[in-house]
Image (cartoon, helix red, strand yellow):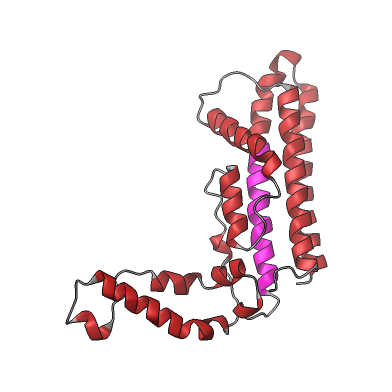
Amino acid sequence: MTADELRAALEVELAWRQEELAFFKNQLNNIAERNKDKYRKSLVLILYSHMEGFIKISLQTYIQFINSQDLNRKDVNTGLMVAGMHKEFNAYENLDRKSEYFRKELPEDSRLHRLFRRVDFMEKVEDLKDKKLIIDDQIIDTESNLWYIVLQKNLYKIGLPIDLFDSYKRDIDALVNRRNSIAHGSFKSGVSEQEFSNWENKVSDVLSGVTRMIYDYANSKKYLI
């Protein structure tokens, strides 16, 4: 996959979501004025689902692009290197993994076994870095609630900047909160045109920004050390 193919895939993904949202927005023309605020509650749910869905798929597509570059772990930035060593880190963090030599002598000495795992890791770390980089795209987890901090966590996992969208934090969190209150039935009043328009514009900015950021990192090879 090339950087231009990556960008094209993201643009196609974004376009169909924009078209679907526009379709449901256009239905407002067929709804009585007194019911429009109530109808916009459903638009909030659609808007949020497309924000979460697009971001998740975009980050997973970026991972697929990285995997297609045939790189070694040592070639990429630290975030991607760590992402590619997820299974190895899980193995070294396994508290049941103990030194065979000390297992019989000191079976309950957790500090010693932790030291063993650390020594073992450091002895093998260069070999681990030399292996081909393969990242499991399932490390992207929006947790069914894409709060701003969750977005940052996912960007951080794959070595992307976490502060580019700081100015949208309040709006993203407000949208997630409103989506949850509507979905759970605790928000009974309607959503005004101004309120929805604000969220729609902010989400559009974020999704376009994610697309530009990913393409920039891919095209400029910022994923390399």
The answer to whether 102 appears left or right of 62 in the picture is left
Q: Quadrant of residue 213?
A: bottom right
> 165 or 144, which lies in front?
165
- Residue 75 on the magenta span: no
Quadrant placement of the C terminus:
bottom right
> 134 or 113, which lies in front?
113
The residue lying at 73 percent from left, 45 percent from top is: 206
Name the outermost residue toward the top.
34
The answer to whether 9 appears left or right of 86 in the picture is right
**Above or below, comparing residue 69 to residue 28 in the picture:** below
Q: Quadrant of residue 194?
A: top right
The span picked out in magenta is: 46-67
Q: Position of residue 10 (x, y in %)?
A: 76, 57
The residue lying at 70 percent from left, 40 percent from top is: 167
Q: What is the chief secondary structure element of the magenta stretch?
A: helix
Q: Position of residue 75 (x, y in %)?
A: 66, 78
The residue lying at 77 percent from left, 43 percent from top is: 205
> 143 or 96, which lies in front?
96
Q: Position of residue 159 (x, y in %)?
A: 63, 63
- Residue 51 on the magenta span: yes
Q: Quadrant of residue 195?
A: top right
Q: Position of residue 90 (x, y in %)?
A: 42, 69
**Above or below, comparing residue 51 to residue 34 in the picture:** below
Total numbered badges shown on the rendered structure? 0
The answer to whether 170 appears left or right of 207 in the picture is left
**Above or below, comparing residue 62 to residue 85 in the picture:** above
Name the outermost residue toward the left.
105
